[in-house]
């Protein structure tokens, strides 16, 4: 019997919402799904471009949308880079926090 390979999922969020990101990460780890996260997987002094290439090749991208996320220059850089990847719109899984509702 062939063993299925777990999908690669990048978790994008503002560091102001790290508690929410940690909770989502923990819940998914409990069912055997690991996220690719900048704080854990982008090594100190490593190439941001190389990390973003890994992110761009991920199967899915979970985005925790909050006011802080939308105001973060780094988060917007991530989104701009991801928009240029293959079928980004089919791989995005948004999670909207209450403080982001005013934008919709």
Image (cartoon, grey):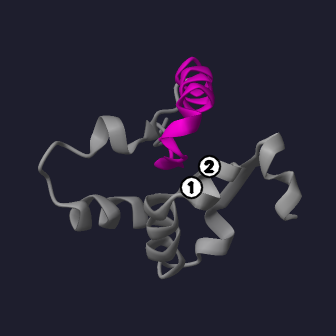
Residue 7 colored in magenta in the image: yes
Give left or right: position of 94 versus 33. right
Say which element carries label 1.
strand
Where residue 97 sits, quadrant-wise, is: top right
- Estimate the x, y position of residue 74 in percent, counting from the top left: 43, 60
Residue 57 visible at all: no
- Estimate the x, y position of residue 69 in percent, counting from the top left: 60, 53
Single out the residue that lies furthest toward the left.
45
Residue in view at x 31 percent, y 67 percent: 53
Residue in view at x 54 percent, y 78 percent: 83
Q: Which residues are magenta?
A: 6-31
> Against 20, is 49 above or below?
below
- Estimate the x, y position of residue 59 in percent, counting from the top left: 51, 58
Residue in view at x 52 percent, y 67 percent: 76
- Estimate the x, y position of residue 63 in percent, counting from the top left: 62, 52
Q: Which mark is residue 61?
A: 1
Give the CA separation, mark 2 to mark 1.
18 Å
Closer to the camera, 73 or 32?
Answer: 73
* Label 1 Cα crowd, 10 Å radius (few <14 / some 14-19 / many 20+): many
Residue 79 visible at all: yes
Single out the residue that lies furthest toward the top.
30
> Against 11, is 56 above or below?
below
Closer to the camera, 103 or 94?
Answer: 103
Residue in view at x 59 percent, y 35 percent: 17
* Label 2 Cα crowd, 10 Å radius (few <14 / some 14-19 / many 20+): some
Query: Which part of the image, by quadrant, shows the C terminus?
Result: bottom right
> Against 32, is 45 above or below?
below
Q: Which mark is residue 68?
A: 2
Closer to the camera, 5 or 66?
Answer: 66
Say which element carries label 2.
helix
Residue 64 colored in magenta in the image: no
Look at discs 2 and 1 and give the one toward the viewer: 2
């Amino acid at each position: 019997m062939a063993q299925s390979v777990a999908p690669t999922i990048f978790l994008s969020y503002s560091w102001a919402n790290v508690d929410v990101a940690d909770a989502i990460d923990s819940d998914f780890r409990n069912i055997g799904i690991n996220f690719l996260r900048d704080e854990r997987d982008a090594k100190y002094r490593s190439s941001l471009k190389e990390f973003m290439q890994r992110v761009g090749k991920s199967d899915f991208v979970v985005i925790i949308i909050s006011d802080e996320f939308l105001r973060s220059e780094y988060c917007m850089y991530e989104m701009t880079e991801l928009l240029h990847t293959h079928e980004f719109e089919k791989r995005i899984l948004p999670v909207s926090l209450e403080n982001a509702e005013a934008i919709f």
